Amino acid sequence: MRNKIFFEKEKKENLIYGKHPILSAFESGQTLDVIYTQKELKSEILDEIRDLAKKNGVPLKAVPKDKLDYLTFRANHQGVAAFIAIVNYYEKDELLKEVLEKNKVPFILILDSITDVRNFGAISRTALGTGVQFVITAKRNSAQINAEAMKTSAGALNNLPVCREDDLVQTVKWCKQNNIKVLVSDLQATKNLAEINFNEPVAIVVGEEAEGVNRLIINRADETFKIPITAQVDSYNVSVATGMILYEAMKGRKN
């Protein structure tokens, strides 16, 4: 019951619904995490909201009416609802510029398809503690940074900049254009984690434990590595694995 109350409180505080409140959110410059629109429902205002979402890089999800009814406790949602972001999102070019201006060696974490908010929060806490300068995640198929993620991060997400990108494959290309080596955690890799040189500009890519990192990203990596594991265990929880990786990276870095 306690968890249910917390979840309902979170939804009421972070959720807006109805056409005009969402248009007003855009007009006032509020950042939205995601917008849900009712499948097959059409209107000029909904089309305007969809256009604004695409223009502002806000993920759009077409869902059945039942989903919107559940999110809004059967309120008059008019076929649309949205979560207001509780953190600010940043541009990766600006963050990289700041890192270089401080004469720091870039140390970036890229999260591919980490959808569990608790894992996202735990990873963020570890990333901040091990010196990661910023995190990059995808706009779609990624955990929403909500109150639960913030709580699990123990407030780390207030201090760790997060970027949201349309395409992580393009992000890998961006890293290479900026002379940042892309290192990918992959169970099929031949190198072990301890063999990797982290004392240079690096972007570490991790993926969720079931599917791992997208193969298109793996194929574009500068190096892949694996964490040693016994035959009795198939894989580590992604937040645990990321903690191992970031601790090893922190030990090997001088700046």
Image (cartoon, helix red, strand yellow):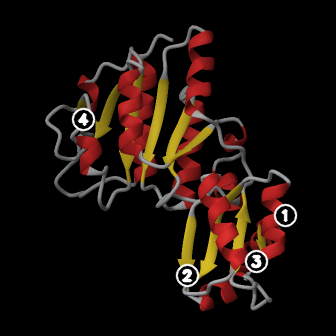
Q: Can see residue 148? A: yes
Residue at the image point whose x is 24% and y is 49% from the top: 215
Among numbered discs 2 and 4, the one appearing first in the sequence? 2
Of tags 4 and 1, the one toward the viewer is 1
Which residue is labeled 4 in the image? 225
Among numbered discs 4 and 3, the one appearing first in the sequence? 3
The circle on residue 8 is 3
Examine the image and state in which quarter residue 231 appears.
bottom left
Q: In this view, does 239 lie to the left or right of 185?
A: right
Of tags 2 and 4, the one toward the viewer is 2
**Label 4 element class:** strand
Residue 39 percent across, percent down from the top left: 55, 84
Toward the viewer: 177 or 132? 177
Among numbered discs 2 and 1, the one appearing first in the sequence? 1
Which residue is labeled 1 in the image? 24
Of tags 2 and 1, the one toward the viewer is 1
Dot 3 amino acid type: Glu
Examine the image and state in which quarter residue 177 appears.
top left
**Label 2 element class:** strand
- Examine the rendered structure and indicate whether residue 23 appears above or below residue 72: above
Q: Which residue extends farthest top?
A: 103
- Examine the rendered structure and indicate whether residue 245 appears above or below residue 56: above
Among numbered discs 4 and 1, the one appearing first in the sequence? 1
Of tags 3 and 1, the one toward the viewer is 1
